[in-house]
Amino acid sequence: MISVQDLHKSFKLFARPADRLLEAITGRERHATHVALDGVSFQVGEGEVLGVLGRNGAGKSTLLKLMTGVLMPDAGEIHIDGRVTGLLELGTGFNPELTGAQNITANALMLGMSHAEIDARREAIIEFCELGEYIHEPLRTYSSGMVMRLGFAIAIHADPACFLVDEALSVGDGYFQQKCMKRIRQFKEDGGAILFVSHDLNAVKVLCDRALVLEGGRVVHEGDPEGAVNLYNRIMARQAEEEEGRHQARAGAYGNFQVEVTAASARGARSGSTTLSSGETLALELTLHAHQALDNIALGVLIRDRFGQDIFGINTFQQQGPFAMAAGERREVRLAIEAAIAPGKYTITLALHSGDHHLDDCYWWHDAALQVEVAGYLGSKFSGLCRLPCHIDLDAAPVAAPEESP
């Protein structure tokens, strides 16, 4: 369905606009070369979703523009069976002075639809985007979420064989994002091929069959979504460290190791083992060791299910702010989590970082540092991923109807 072979794309970067003219006149090179894609290859089959991860500048947007024909490659081949549509940069292909209804015609024609196809699907597009009377207002009056609604509705109704989704989807409200995800799943079930570019790591894990990671214009990983997400997290955590020229890894962990977890265990408070019941307290015991004095430390815990989907995450910064440790200090830490989660196997990721996340200073991060299994229930059973507090009153008094005014 989608075949990309040895794709290359570079851009010339000029320090000043005048340098472009001087290079053309004199023939002397006055530009620097930025390699956006360097030998990228992959395939996506029918009914398959391939996720694409990478930090800013890794080449994700360039890849999508090449696949939609916005840019031409320097070398390599792209083969796509059937029509390809996508939701790329917000507002691409729209005229802000035209109404939403007029932009349906203009944008759909750019996607390769005929006037007959547009007329046949116009009402379905308008109904899906749920813009109401705003469909007759100029696009310049729309919010970014409204533009996304219109763009997605047109693209998904263009009857594509391949669908490309970029970060534009993230600007929509929660309800419409769910609606889009449902439509994407239906498109997949109907045999469509999807390239899904997103920083929503949970969406990549849940929606994608495979995922690849781009770094410096190259594919550095292609495989299961969980492995790709873990590598992406590692790349993001390493970014700040690389700027200072320091990085090391110990026993599956990574970070700058200014402070680290040197020992960790997980067990059920009742069972005393790594197998516990749903609703039982999960007890974590950790030993921290600081190699230098730090005054901004947060300890993070992330529980993932067997699909690699994030079930629950918390860190001490969110709970009580940062804590400090002196150079050489060792500290014993205990956490108690009410594991009201469905039976199954889970991994526990542990992290030490500054502030609310690991993207600025990642001291230590270990994916799947611990494993536990939940078997059976304490109390009543439930469906889904977790138990939520719920009160049911079967003998509630009926609500009286309001009295009518005389």
Image: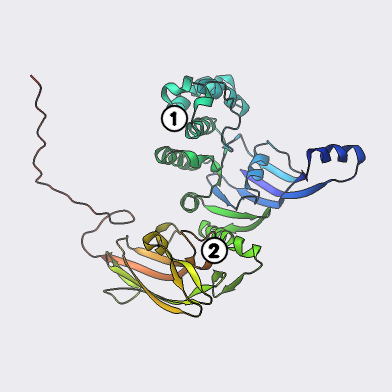
Q: Amino acid at mark 1?
A: Phe
Residue 360 in the image: above or below residue 189:
below
Q: Secondary structure at mark 2?
A: loop
- Who's the residue at 52% across and 45% down the image? 47
Q: Position of residue 88 (x, y in %)?
A: 58, 38
Would you say 55 lies left or right of 284 here?
A: right
In the rendered image, the vertical position of residue 348 relative to residue 155, given as above or below: below
The one nearer the camera, 221 or 298, is: 298
Q: Amino acid at mark 2?
A: Asp
Which mark's residue is nearer the viewer, 1 or 2?
2
Q: Which residue is mark 1?
A: 128
- Mark 1 / mark 2, whichever is N-terminal: 1
Q: In which image quadrant can residue 106 be found? A: top right
- Front-most of residues 148 and 304: 148
Residue toward you, 370 or 253: 253
Is residue 285 rendered to the left or right of residue 54? left
